[in-house]
Amino acid sequence: MVRTINPDDPRHPYQQIADHLSEEIASGELSGRVPSELELRREYSAGASTVQRALTVLRERGVIYTVPGRGSFVKQPDDDAEG
């Protein structure tokens, strides 16, 4: 599924992606493993730095954590460590 970044939205593209993923996490639509950077780049037709920045925002919000070499995962309320 290709999602588009709205050029008329005042938010930066990375913020649009982060907000969209946050909404999916909050609704329960996205749980477990977060799509890879490559998958997100394809899904949003976005560059690597845009997707990386979106994932950084989500980590800073405390909604995902990343395990090097394994990927990013939705943080559950009972998760003790962020990886």
Image (tube, helix red, strand yellow):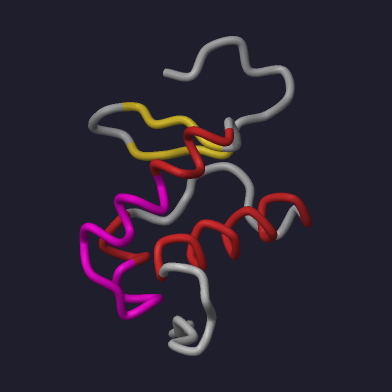
Q: Is residue 48 above or below residue 1?
A: above
Query: Quick check: 4 left or right of 45?
Result: right
Query: Quick check: 32 left or right of 40?
Result: right
Residue 5 is situated, as x and y percent measured from the top left of the image, at: 45, 81
Q: Residue at x 49, y 33 (%)?
A: 60
Residue 15 covered by magenta stretch: no
Query: Quick check: 13 left or right of 80?
Result: left
Per the rendered image, the range of residues in magenta is 41-55
Q: Residue at x 57, y 39 (%)?
A: 74
Q: In the rendered picture of this protein, how many numbered marks are placed on residues?
A: 0
Q: Main SS type for the magenta part?
A: helix
Residue 4 is situated, as x and y percent measured from the top left of the image, at: 46, 85
In the picture, residue 19 is in which quadrant? bottom right
Outermost residue on the front side: it is: 10
Residue 44 is situated, as x and y percent measured from the top left of the image, at: 39, 76
Outermost residue on the right side: it is: 27
Q: Nearer the viewer, residue 6 or 76?
A: 6
Residue 54 covered by magenta stretch: yes
